[in-house]
Image (cartoon, rainbow, N blue to C red):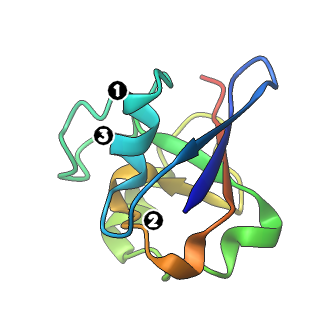
Amino acid sequence: MKIRFIDEDGRAIDTDAAAGERLLDVGQRIGMPLEGTCEGQMACATCHVIIDAADFDRLPPASEEEEDMLDLAPGATRTSRLSCQIVLDDAMDGLTARIART
């Protein structure tokens, strides 16, 4: 599947991803500034991304724990998610994620 990241400068970077990969891992593989400091334990928001509004409803809902972490994320929006919590599936082909400005 194809995933598009929009970096902090507004540049679009398209990449391939496989079902079952975490969005965090895909972004890190292509050099996106997604730290993932807590390694997916939802103890930080260093992997915060903003999902394109057209794609947001294709994702499973965020857990209450994820919502709590997003409340602390700088620049969080209605379509913000933690990329460590998004496990890609075939229905997410073409997903666009913007790197959140910190």
Q: Residue at x 44, y 76 (%)?
A: 89
Kindly state the secondary structure of the residue where label 1 is placed.
Answer: loop
Residue 50 lies left or right of residue 20; in this view the side is right
- The answer to whether 81 appears left or right of 96 in the picture is left
Crowd rating for badge 2 (residues with CA inside 10 Å; few <14, some 14–19, many 20+): some
Residue that label 1 marks: 35
- Measuring 30% from the left and 35% from the top, which residue is drawn there? 36
**Amino acid under label 1?**
Glu
Q: In the figure, is residue 100 to the left or right of 69?
A: right
At label 2, the amino acid type is Glu
Q: Earlier in the sequence, mark 1 or mark 3?
A: 1
The residue type indicated by label 3 comes to Cys
x, y percent for residue 17 = 45, 54
Q: Is residue 76 left or right of residue 18?
A: right
Residue annotated with mark 3: 44
Mark closer to the chain start, 3 or 2: 3
Q: Give percent across and percent down for residue 26.
A: 41, 43
What residue is disc 2 on? 67
